[in-house]
Image: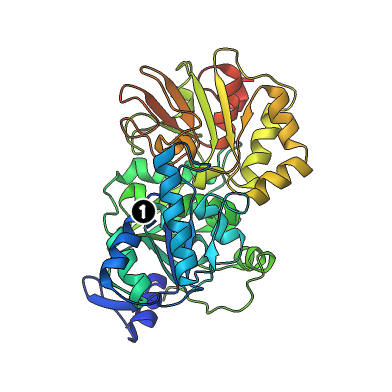
Amino acid sequence: MAQTISQKILAKHAGKKTVQPGELINCKVDLVLGNDITAPTAIKEFEKISVSKVFDKKKIYLVPDHFTPAKDIKSAEQVKMMRKFAHKYGIVNFFEIGCMGVEHALLPEMGAIRPGDLIIGADSHTCTYGALGAFSTGVGSTDMAAAMATGEVWFKVPEQLKFIFRGKLNKWVEAKDLILYTIGRIGVDGARYMSMEFTGPVISNISVEGRLTMANMAIEAGGKNGIFEVDEKTKDYLKKAHVTRYPLFDSDKDAEYAKIYDWDVSAIEPQIAYPHLPSNVHPVSQSRHIKLDQSVIGSCTNGRIEDMRVAAKILKGKKVHPDLRLIILPATQQVELQMIKEGLTEIFIKAGAAVSTPTCGPCLGGHMGILAEGERSIATTNRNFVGRMGHPKSEVYLSNVAVAAASAVLGYIGSPEDL
């Protein structure tokens, strides 16, 4: 029976030849992930199970990134609990400050993700790893606890959606715009508990970093996971991360999809998601002159070196608007180091930006850029819900990196073309 990539990966990990949408299956996992918000709850639940060891010391990853460096006593205690748990059970992959990064940028960069893997994380944006041909999805902290003990998790097999992108992208249009455009077309529940498969000529020309951005935001359309076939670009990326042996899956030509979207994206502009939903999308040409107080460039969505190079290209020789603060968040220590080597950090500081150590920070209203009442921020992050970045009466507008950088100079939402 014909299967998609996602179905083939689920079937393999369930010990079955095929799986069908709606079927309940039990799967073995390749990687279990938790952060400083979700892991402490999972640890408490794990201790209730009264098991003497974790299923595999090398397959559990604990990454404190949301409130780190610790912003207060409570966040420090959360990380302390993770550290003690890692030491107690001999967990190898605990990433403390100085060797950490934003989890969904760190794991692909360090070679922890392989095509064909089944990955769960107690964080909704775990779907990021589908960019490398893995089936990855977010789960609750109790599921994380059970998986740490047993190495297994249950799923209802999702229905399948296919997104085909054709044409040629306009200047300054990035992968971020493709996923915002997609969410704008189908809505925040348009892929609810479905697998989102991205393909087509445009996707073939997008970098792996761009695909990571798109897969990251599959959850904003309600998707169970987002996934891409492995191609030569993926293989080159994996080789640099020292990942050389992995299975390859592709979708059968006659695989069944609940729906296929086939779009020519040649005419789209950079997209702006207005408050308070990622689906409230408008082209940048209709968004000019919305005054801003802050611009945030970074996060697990757009904090990679490719993103920093785009921002530096626009900010070089320019100054951040005097009424606006620009916060730049490299997603990992490696990205931060590369920024220094390439002179990007100097460009940002001379422009008047604040450059942070790797952290999720303001993306979830954690720290390093909280909004006051009535303030507006443009951000390369993935969510703009009410109160997401601070005060419930603040506003967050989502954009690509180029628009966020240009807007920081302009003081209002605008395109690099306006500079």
Q: Residue at x 50, y 47 (%)?
A: 300
Residue 198 vertical position relative to residue 175 in the rendered view, above or below: below
Query: Would residue 34 appear left or right of 25 to someone viewing this image?
Result: right
| Quadrant of the rendered image containing residue 398 | top left
Q: Amino acid at mark 1?
A: Thr
Which residue is at the front of the view, 249 or 33? 33
Where is residue 373 shown, x and y percent of the image?
Answer: 36, 18
Query: Which secondary structure, mark 1?
Result: loop
Quarter placement of the N terminus: bottom left
- Please state which of residues 133 and 90 is positioned toward the viewer in this rendering: 90
Residue 72 vs residue 196, the one in the foreground? 72
Residue 388, visible in the rendered structure: yes
Asked which quadrant contains residue 146, the reply is bottom left
Q: Position of residue 280 (x, y in %)?
A: 34, 33
User: Residue 135's x, y, as percent?
Assistant: 42, 68
Q: Position of residue 272 (x, y in %)?
A: 44, 32
Say which residue label 1 marks: 38
Which sits in the foreground, 24 or 264?
24
